[in-house]
Amino acid sequence: MFSIIIPTKDRQALEKRAIESVLAQTYKDWELLISDASGDDHLLDYVRTLKEDPIGRYDIKYYHSRELPHVRRRQLTEVAQGEILAYLDSDDYWLPQKLKEHHQVHQEHPEVGLTWDHFKNIDHGQLAKNQAPQPLISGIHQPPRIFTVMTQNLWNPFFLHMSSLVAKKSAVMATGGFPNTPFCDGYLAGQIGRQYPVYYLDKLLTYVDISAQKRLSNQRWPRPEYWWVGLRVTFRYPKVLLPGLYRYFFTHGRKAYLTKHLPFIKREIRSSNSETLNGTN
C-alpha cells in the first residue's frame, strides 16, 4: 500500500487539484495523509465530503499542524501505514498512472529503496521555458556511486523534486527517518542512495507548478536557515558538493533565479558579468 503525504497551507485552488490527481490514480491501494497549516476549515470540509462519498470510500486522514513543511512531512512519515511513501506538494499534481508505474518498479526490484520519475515545470498553465534533462539514465543505480551523483546535483533544481519521489518506508526509517531539514528532497535521496539501490523512472508522471505563490521551493533561498543547511552539507561532503555548488551559482539560469529572489545580490552579479544576465556570451 502507498501512503501519500501532502503538507499544505492556504492553497484553496491548488490543493484540490493535487488531491484530485491522487483520486484519479489507476492504482487504488493507497491512503492519503494531509497536514494542513491553514487558519480556516475549508480543506477539512472538502476532505469530509470526500470521506462521506459512498462510491469512493477514500482512505483520507487529515491533520492540522503549524510546523514547517519538512517537519510535517516527517510527522506524517512516522504515522504512515503504507509500505511505500509517495510525497506530493499541494502545488503540484500527478498523472493517473503515477502510482501504478512506481508500484511495478518496486515489485520488479524489491531491493530498491527509492524511485523517482521525470517531472516538468509548468508556469501559469503552460510548460515553463526553463527545463533541463536528468543527469541519470533510466534504470537502477547502485550505491555508493549514486550518492556522489546525487550530492553533486543537490543544487540542481531539475535533478529531482519532492513531488517526484517515492520511497520505501523501511528504507526511510533505516537511514534516519525523514530528514528534519528544509533540504528534504536532496537529503532524502542522498541518505537512501548511500545504502540502497535507487531507480530513476524516465517517464513524465509529475508536474511541478513553479507559478504558485508562496511555495516553499520558491522561497527557501532568501531564508538564512536554508543557507546554513547548504553550507553544513557542503563542508561535510566537499569533494562531491563543491562542483555542484559551482554549477548552481555560475550558470545563467541560476543567476537569473538569484537575481529574482535575492535582490541584494543583483548589483554584484550585474557588475561582474552583465553579459550573462543579458543572455549573451
Image (tube, rainbow, N blue to C red):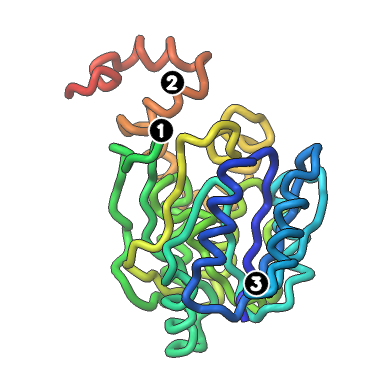
Front-most of residues 78 and 149 = 78
Label 1, secondary structure: give it. helix
Q: In percent of the image, x 52 and y 36: which residue is there?
A: 212
Percent across and percent down for residue 21 are 51, 60
Left or right of residue 40, residue 53 in this image:
left
Front-most of residues 2 and 117 = 2
Q: Which residue is mark 2?
A: 259
Q: Is residue 265 above or below residue 225?
A: above
Q: In percent of the image, x 38 and y 78: which residue is there?
A: 140
Q: Is residue 69 above or below residue 253?
A: below
Q: Which residue is mark 3?
A: 3
Dot 1 amino acid type: Phe
The answer to whether residue 242 of the structure is visible from this angle is no
Dot 2 amino acid type: Thr
Whole-Å distance between the Cαs marked 3 and 1? 36 Å
Front-most of residues 228 and 51 = 51
Percent across and percent down for residue 81 are 73, 77
Question: Which numbered disc, 1 or 2, marks the residue that appears first in the sequence?
Answer: 1
Q: Which residue is mark 1?
A: 249
Label 2, secondary structure: give it. helix
Mark 2 or 3: the one toward you: 3
Left or right of residue 86, residue 80 in this image:
right
Q: Is residue 196 above or below residue 8?
A: below
Whole-Å distance between the Cαs marked 1 and 2? 11 Å
Question: Which numbered disc, 3 or 1, marks the residue that appears first in the sequence?
Answer: 3
Q: Which mark, by number, is residue 70? A: none
Whole-Å distance between the Cαs marked 2 and 3? 38 Å
Dot 3 amino acid type: Ser
Question: Crowdedness of circle 1 by 10 Å Cα count: few (<14), some, many (20+)?
Answer: some
Q: In percent of the image, x 72 and y 59: which residue is there?
A: 49
